[in-house]
Image (cartoon, grey):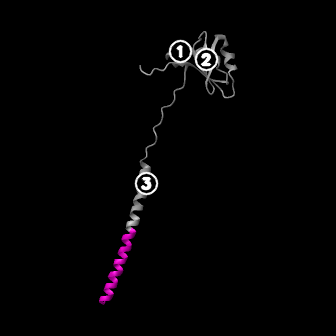
Amino acid sequence: MTTVSKLNSHFEMSERETRMERVKYMLLPGLMAVVMSMFSGCAVTPPAQEPPVEKYTTEKAEQQPRVPDEYLVTLAPDADEAVIFKYYKRFGIKYLHQLEGETYLLILSSDPGPHEMDVLIENEARIKLVQPNLIHWDYR
């Protein structure tokens, strides 16, 4: 092998190595980004599950402090407030006020209690929920 051919082979080797270095420097950061995104996607924790909402029960309502003679009545979307008068006028309706959407504040003259309020509407689809106006304490 002549000196010129040795230099050419050395030069070709250097050029090949240079190309490999360029590929390495261009490919390596991209590959690292892909791997990091894969692992970071696996490291995301699922959002904390909210505790299940407790179903309203009359027994529980009897135990909690509540505003006497006051109830929150939620109607079905197609019902009007006349259904409230139909079931509760016998207790003397002092005040009926729409709070939000289908929810009304009902104030009675004589309070029959949460259980009796529920029993009256057991088979009535136009009234979705009747619950006492509970007192929520900020600091106890």
The residue that appears at 46% across and 40% down in the rendered structure is 47
Give the left or right position of residue 129, taking residue 44 as reference: right
Vertically, is 23 above or below 8?
Answer: above
- Residue in the foreground of this view, choosing between 61 and 78: 78
Image quadrant where one finds the N terminus:
bottom left
Q: Residue at x 38, y 73 (%)?
A: 19
Task: Mark 1 or mark 3: name the one nearer the start of the chain.
Answer: 3
Q: Nearer the viewer, mark 3 or mark 2?
A: 2
Residue behind mark 2: 106
Foreground label between 1 and 3: 1
Secondary element under disc 1, as helix, strand or loop, is strand
Residue 107's image quarter?
top right
Q: Earlier in the sequence, mark 3 or mark 2?
A: 3
Q: Which numbered disc, 2 or 1, marks the residue that appears first in the sequence?
A: 1
Report, in whole angstroms, how far the alpha carbon at label 2 lies from the one at label 1.
11 Å
Q: Which amino acid does the dot numbered 2 rest on? A: Leu
Estimate the x, y position of residue 12 in percent, counting from the top left.
36, 81
Write down the region rendered in magenta. Answer: 1-23
Q: Main secondary structure of the magenta part?
A: helix
Disc 3 and disc 2: Cα gap in Å? 56 Å
What residue is disc 3 on?
37
Q: x, y (%) of residue 74?
A: 62, 24
Does 18 appear in magenta? yes
Q: Which mark is residue 67?
A: 1
Q: Is residue 124 magenta?
A: no
Indicate the amino acid at tag 1.
Val
